[in-house]
Image (spheres, helix red, strand yellow):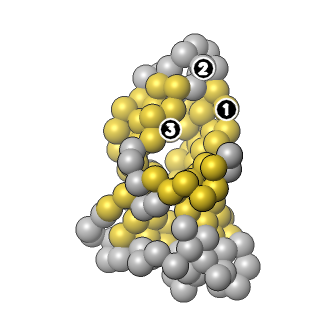
Amino acid sequence: MATTVARPNSAPTVASAVALHVGETSTGDGTTADRRALTGPADLVATFTDTGSNTVTFDIQGSADNTNWWNVPYALIATPSTWVIAAVTYNTNGGGTVHYLLQGGQPWRYLRMHITANTATTVDASAYFFAP
């Protein structure tokens, strides 16, 4: 799995994206995103692909120093005011795409998706960062 830090390609006042996992089929950390000065909300978009009813478990983690990590608050589109910090368990049932909305104004600069369990599912995930 990659350990590089990817930076958004655009100016810090507009939305920009960083690929965290591309075609991932195992566990661990993908690419770490550095949101730099962007402190607004973010959207982690994860697409899961499989041929059956498999499960993926992961944490959405932030860090201020790229060394110490913690789970960051996220919400789903259907319940945008209900913030959760627990690990995500997604039963893919053939696949799908989910948006995990991340709170703005939180004290993390770096973001990663740490996959702790993966039963034969391909994961593609990107983080989109926005200005406040």
Query: Considering only vertical position in the picture, is 75 above or below 104?
Result: above
The image position of residue 81, as x and y in percent, is 60, 59
Whether residue 11 is visible, yes or no, is no
Three-letter residue code for mark 2? Asn
Residue 104 appears left or right of 17: left
Count of all numbered marks drawn on residues in the image:
3
Q: Secondary structure at mark 3?
A: strand
Label 1 Cα neighbours within 10 Å, binned few <14 / some 14-19 / many ≥20 = few
Query: Considering only vertical position in the picture, is 73 above or below 10?
Result: above
Q: Which residue is mark 3?
A: 24
Q: Please tell me which of labels 1 and 3 falls first in the chain.
A: 3
Q: CA distance from mark 1 to mark 3?
A: 15 Å
Residue pushed farthest left? 68
Label 2 Cα neighbours within 10 Å, binned few <14 / some 14-19 / many ≥20 = some
Label 3 Cα neighbours within 10 Å, binned few <14 / some 14-19 / many ≥20 = many
Nearer the camera: disc 3 or disc 2? 2
Residue pushed farthest top? 52
Q: Quadrant of the C terminus?
A: bottom right
Q: Secondary structure at mark 2?
A: loop
Q: Which residue is mark 2?
A: 93
> Looking at the rendering, which quadrant does residue 10 occupy?
bottom right
Three-letter residue code for mark 3? Glu
Three-letter residue code for mark 1? Gly
Q: Please tell me which of labels 3 and 2 falls first in the chain.
A: 3
Q: Residue at x 66, y 74 (%)?
A: 130
Q: Which residue is mark 1?
A: 96
